[in-house]
Each structure stands twice: as C-alpha cells, then as structure tokens.
Image (cartoon, rainbow, N blue to C red):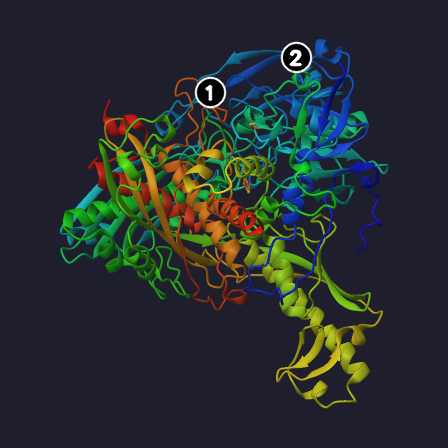
Amino acid sequence: MADTTSPRASSSVTRTPTSLTQGSTTKGGIGESTLRPDGILKVTGEFAYSSDLWHEDMLWGYTLRSTVAHAEIRSIDTSEALATSGVYAVLTYDDLPTEVKNYGLEIQDTPVLAHGKVRHHGEPVALVAADHPETARRAAAKIRIEYADLPVVTDEASATAPDAILVHEGRDDHHSGHVPHPNIVHRQPIVRGDADAAAARADVVVRGEYVFGMQDQAFLGPESGLAVPGEDGGVDLYVATQWLHSDLRQIAPVLGLPEKKVRMTLSGVGGAFGGREDLSMQIHACLLALRTGKPVKIVYNRFESFFGHVHRHPAKLWYEHGATRDGKLTHVKCRIVLDGGAYASASPAVVGNAASLSIGPYVVEDVAIEALALYTNNPPCGAMRGFGAVQACFAYEAQMDKVAAELGLDPVEFRQRNAMEQGTVMPTGQPVDSPAPVAELLRRVKSRPLPPERQWEVAGGAADVRALPGGLSNTTHGEGVVRGVGYAVGIKNVGFSEGFDDYSTARVRMEVINGEAVATVHTAMAEVGQGGVTVHAQIARTELGVTQVTIHPADTQVGSAGSTSASRQTYMTGGAVRNTCEAVREKVLEIGRRKFGTYHPAWATAELLLEGGKVVTDGGEALAGIAEVLEDEAVDLELEFRHRPTQAFDLRTGQGNGHVQYSFAAHRAVVEVDTELGLVKVVELACAQDVGKALNPLSVVGQIQGGTTQGLGVAVMEEIVVDPVTAKVRNPSFTDYLIPTILDTPTIPVDVLELADEHAPYGLRGIGEAPTLSSTPAVLAAIRNATGLELNKTPIRPEHLTGS
Amino acid sequence: MRVTFTVNGAPQEADDVWEGESLLYVLRERMGLPGSKNACEQGECGSCTVRLDGVPVCSCLVAAGQVQGREVVTVEGLAGEGGELSTVQQAFVDAGAVQCGFCTPGLLVAADELLERNPEPSDGDIREALSGNLCRCTGYEKILDAVRLAAARTEEAV
Ligand code: FES
Ligand code: FES
C-alpha cells in the first residue's frame, strides 16, 4: 500500500513491523476460530516487538528518576554526566524546546521532565543518550540532584486536611471548579430515588468497609521504542502503545512539530492492559533523537517499568445495603475513594465508571453514591483492565454475600432475585437496552459439576504437592486443608463514555493480484495481543468474499482508531472495518453493474453479496468473478465509524445516558486453604460470560481466561506496596511483586453465551474486561466460605488467614 | 572482550563485549537474535529462556563470558532448516496459546525441553516445567492445551 511516499527513515531501520498476509483454507470469516496472522512470526521469534528495534548507529536513552516522592529540586548538575565518554546528550527541563512542557490524557498536568519539584517516587528528572545502555545508566548516576523534602500526602485524611500541602498548586482544569478540595481530581455523586426513605423499609441493613490494593498491569513487553530523526526535521517513532493518535496529540506540541512530522508506527506490543494508555518513553526518545540527530532507542527494565506506567487505583470503599426479608434489595449507599496518585492520568473517567457501576448488575431503585479520586504523592494511577468497575465489584459482591447470609438465603439465589435484566434502569437513569442475562450467567456457573475433592491424592496414599496450597514448597500433604466455594457477577461498560466523541477509522483496499481478488485493511488499531488483527481479517473475508487479506502495520498515516482499551476495539475498529468493507462492496457492485449490468437482470434487482471471490445474489446465483469486475481497478476507501452518542453525567445527580454498552460475566471459584499456614490454592475458576457474538471463539475464550487470571492475581498475591510514611514503592520487581504462574492458575472452564446486542456490529459485546471484575470477589468469597473469616481487603495474604 | 560460542548450530562471535553484558544482551543486540525476550532482566519471568548445553537457563542471568565455547539454542533454532515449524511451535499457534506472544519464545524453549525429556507429561508435569515462565495474557489454559497437543502429535508421529 501507498505509505512509501512519506519521508520515512524506515529503510535503514531493521526489525520494523511488517504487513501480515494470511490466506485461509476455509471461509475464514467471522464466527470461525481462525488463527492469528501474526502467530507464526511470534513462535519463530521473528515478530518485531518495540524492544527489538535496531538501527545501525542508534544510541540508547536512559531516564533518571526521582529517588524521593515529594521534594523541591534545588539544583541539578549534569556536567560530570555530560563529560562521560560515549555520552551524546543529557537533557533536563531547561532543554525542553517549546512552551508546552506537560502532557496528559485529559488534564495536562504531567511534566515531561520534572520542573522545580517532584511529586512522586520515580518521576523522570533527566535523560541521557549514550552509545551503550550501561554507559547511559552510569552517566545518569553522575547527575547530581539536590532535593529538599516536602511533606507527603498519601490518603484521604492527609490529602484533604484543611492545611494539606497541595499536590498541584494553582490548578486550573475543567474539574477544579466542582471538587470540594484541590487534592481531589474529580468527584461524581449519583442520587436516584430516596435511599434514606428506602432504608426505613429494610429488614436487614449490612455495612462494610473494603480496601483494594494497588495492582500493576505487569504486561511482559517493557516500555520501549525507537525514535529516528527525519531529514525534514521531523521524527519517525516506532513504539508500543494502546492509541497512536492520542500519543501523537500529546507528543507533537512538546517537540514543537506539526503532527504530520511525527510519524508513528506501532511496533510489536507485549501486552498492555491499560498500562500503555499514558505516555512513557515516547517524548523522551524523540527529544534525544532530535537533539543528537541520531536514532535513539529506549527500553525500560522491569524495575523502571514499575515506575514507568500508571497502576490500578487502590481504593477504600464504604457500602450500605438494605434488603427486605423476602430477599429484595431496598437501597444501596456507597462511597468510593480512589487514590489517583500524583498526576491525573485517567482518574476522572475511572471515577465516572466507579460511580455509575458501583451497585453492580442489580435492580436498586434508591441509591446514594459518591466516588472520587485523590491527588496524593503516591504513584500515579490510571487505566487498568476493568477501569474503576473492578474495585466496586470486589466490594458490592462481598456485600451481596453478607446480606444473603443475614437473610439466610443462598448467595446465588439472592443475587438472582435482584439481578438486572434488559430494561432495568441504571442508577444513572440509563435503561439497559440490550440483553443482560445476569441470572442466567450465575445459573450456568452454579450448575457446573464441582471439581472432585482431594485431587492431590495419588495412588498409594501419597500426595501430589503441586495440587496443594503451598505447591512445590511442600508445606502440606492435605492436613489442615479446607475447601470453599464462592460466586460473583459483575457489570462493565464497553467503550468510552460520558459524551466522548468516540470513533474509529478503517481504510480498506480491494484489488486483483495474480488473478485473485484480495483485500488490504489499514487501521491505526494497536494490536496489543488481544487479536484485533485476526478479527479484522475475518471481517474483511466475510464482507468482501475474499480469502487473502493483508493487515497493514498500524500507523498514523491513517485516521485514529481510538484506544485499545475499554473492551472497545472489536466493537469500534471491528465496526469501522465492517463499515468500510460495506462501502467498498458497494463500489465493487457499482463497477460490476456498469460492466455487466446489461447481461443479467439480477444486477439491478437482487440483493448482491461478495462470496467466494464472486458476486452472488442472495439466492446464491453467481453473476461474475470479483476479479473480472475489478480487472486492474482498485477500490480504496477510508471511513470513520461511530457508536451511538452518550451523555455526560450530571455533576450533582449523576444522571445521564453515559455508557455505550454493558458487558456481564460471572465466576464460581473453588479454593482450598491451608488454614495453618494461610496458603490458598485456587482449584477451579469457572466463568460464564455473554459476548453477544463471538467473532473468534478461540480468542474470546483466551481473553476470558486471561482476564480471569488477572482477577485471581489481585485476589491472592498482587499488590504494589507503597510505604505510608515516605510514599516510596517497596517492591518494584517480579521478585517482590508476584503475578500468577502456571502453578498458581487453576483450570478455567468457560461458558460463552451469545445474546446479540442489536445496536452493535454483528451483535457483539466488548469482552476483554468483564471477566477481570468478578474473578476477584469470587475467589474472596470462596476463601471466606472455606475459613469463615470476614476478609475485607485484597490481596489476601497468609497473615490475614492465620491471624498472626 | 571477544566471546565465541555456538548458537543454533552455527559458530558466532561477538567483539567488544563488556564484562557485565548478559548472554541475553549479546544475543539480542550483538548477534541479531532478538527472539529471546527481555521482560524482566531479573531472572524471574523466563521470557529469555534458552538452552545452554541442552539445559534451559535464563539468559539474562548468564554472563556472556561464561558461554565461551559452549552451545546455545534459542527460539530461532527451533524451526526446521526449511523454516517449517517444530511440533511445539505449530501446537502453540494452533491451540491459541499466543496472544501478545512476549512469553512465547521462552515457553517454547522450556516446553521443547520438557517434551524431549518427558514425551508424555501429565498436567502436573507441564505446570511444573513451565512454572518459571510468566504469561500475563492467556491464563495459561491454552498453553497447557498446546503442550498436550504437541505431546499427542509427537506420539502419533512415532
Ligand atoms: S528476562 Fe530473564 S528471566 Fe526475565
Ligand atoms: S501471551 Fe502475552 S505474556 Fe503470554
């Protein structure tokens, strides 16, 4: 395709992304489990990830980060670093080329390099470019920074005290006018009905306070990329991100370049999960490349990666649920306090989600809800899979179990009695206008046979310790081990909400090569592992009747695809590909009518499709080969696609049709707990989810299992520990921040329901996030069931179970 | 310093290697073999797994100098001469065991070694052999499927 006209530097760059061309021996259309077009490159080691990029005379960039959480910078002395042999540049705030020195997704409050002050541990202060990564690291260690410590604010009490130090003085953003304190980023109340009056009708009232720890996305591919200065004064940036055009919008002004001179290409992305929605090394690499005139590569190591991206907001949540004796919820009151850390990132949108989804997939007429995010000196928090709905689900599902217990009801049956369905009105006043099979999903996980007891027992009375809590540490052979079962269900929104003008763009070209009609799909969608590229090829096959489809590398030479987040890409860019394919098909048919219309009346009268390389009538009669129709003409279109518009939430009442679509998943967890040592083994974590329409069933199941496992991780092991006194991160490594291994992860049977949403392309529902919600509370419920403990915090640690 | 060793059956040489450089760095940045991955460089994730004289190791923890004169097999060495995928590679593709794929090279090297050692592994054996390889995307179910599939296909072929 014609991207060769731009002044790119790619000819001298090796290991850059390539087009993916894939044929198919079947129809290869939607609904089939076709294989990933990038699968072979990924198993041979040839797939070019952003950390694999290489340019012959490239330099290595390194970021010097603050060693303290909150301090004034009295002085920075770079002279010794600059004098180091092999060092080409050392940059600080003073070297920034334009007046634009901050960036941010919604609020531009994040300095490209610290200016006079650092607000969190690990904030970028200076950059070094050198001819070897170790030279850059050592030179950075020679930069002398004099810090004068400032007091830190780390929680709601310290951040909103009357004399609290302000994280951002002189704030002037679109939320600063309505928040009760300048250290609150955004606050969203939702009031519907009369919760106090309804509480008077309740036979039981249950209150709880919950704490959700800070989770890390822990994508495996480190933040990395390569910036190559162009001959035109611009820059070519190859990078791993979730949204190329959002990066571009933030990068170009800092560099002082028009957007067209910052040419971005997506490199191989090693997972994202929200952690690549904010910029990391993008601007830094470009600054170094433009300063030195040489290509600059930056690759974070794992230690730096923990500082290089935002995390999931830790939260404190207070809930009150009331119910009548017959098991109907009367009201819910809740207050959700999210710690946004030092910079806003996606906090405002996370608040909107937490508030609007705070009561879960239940019918409750009377609610009083408040969610807010703080500015503190803790690490910045932003997007992570589940986005504000995860923390709430952990709390409301614990509450649902407690209310059921008070009423003496089965927890699943109690949920089913209150389950929302199509037509239920959300606390925001928005009616749910597509299937909401909450009760059915619960029924499905519950009716699944339980895994056999004592699976660790092997012949001869021995024990396979790998199947026991403690695993290969060989801590028990079954003594002190008890089993528990727990359930949870959740609701997640799909897509960008609250009135955001969300769209995606797809360019599709159809032409004849070697006598065969083939299609090329070009979008800026970030393939981060989710399988969007697979689905795009399937859609093109279904809509255009071709077998061979080429997926062009994602770049900024085509319009924005929006973010690979919010479970939105199959809906939005999948929708865009379908939309453009339909327009391409119309053009092909037009050409066909022009050439052959006089030969057969069906050209004018029948509904025509493209199938198996031919133009066919809806009755299946072939009218012409697509290759005959097109000959050497090509049809090439680029079009935008939008979902139904949404509305902002009213700032006082929270009312508004804020969401595009909802997505539901339920889990049943079976755990075994060594009650003496407090060790947990999750034996099975079954999921049922409504996906609307599974465009690729194999990928759908893979997404559900992956999301489930991230929920398991935060239930029993994952937490970034921040020192409450210094606000410094204590465990920035995979040695101390644990994510589930294959031994920690149980079998995850998946039951996929396909109830079409008539408003969405093919009836599909965004699926990536919902399983991450209900997984955590299901595991917690199972541990409570096994131990009888209350457990209001996640992750659960052994000391919470042994009380020591 | 100069380091010479065999990679995927062919002799390789790297000059100007700094003492602190890992085998992983030399493979990726000096020998043009970036297939082995760098997810942690802390010996915790297994994405950099290669075989050193047949034994799976985290190449990020091995100093390049230690490899002098020895034999290394990386993910790039798994496919056949003509580029045809090995049984394990094909099984990972077919089973949907690859999402972002960043864990895949290390897992393939580890799984390949497991099946060589134990052609009919139980699920417990597979989990144990792959417990040093983190994957953040898949939840491991499809990785188990892939190894089971590779074992079954190998058996069929015998
Ligand atoms: S990169 Fe070597 S173990 Fe993680
Ligand atoms: S597929 Fe992404 S880490 Fe395993």
Q: Position of residue A194 (x, y in %)?
A: 25, 54
Residue A728: which numbered mark, if any?
1
Q: Which residue is mark 2?
A: A143
User: Compared to A135, does A330 lie above or below?
Assistant: below
- How packed mark 1 is, by other alpha carbons closer than 10 Å (few <14, some 14-19, many 20 or more), is many
Tag 1 secondary structure: loop
Q: Residue A419 is drawn in which quadrant?
A: bottom left
Q: What crowding class fits label 2: few (fewer than 14 Cα within 10 Å), some (14-19), or many (20 or more)?
A: many
| Residue A124 in view (yes/no) | yes
Give residue A144's position: percent from left, percent from top.
63, 10
Q: Amino acid at mark 2?
A: Ile
Q: Horizontal and vertical percent for residue A732?
A: 49, 24
- Front residue of A533/A171: it is A533
Q: Would residue A98 be seen by someone viewing this image from the given angle?
A: no
User: How many numbered callouts?
Assistant: 2
Horizontal side of A28 relative to A381 (left or right) equals right
Q: Residue at x 46, y 41 (%)?
A: B121
> Mark 1 and mark 2: span between their CA atoms?
21 Å
Question: Which of pointers 1 and 2 lies earlier in the amino acid sequence?
Answer: 2
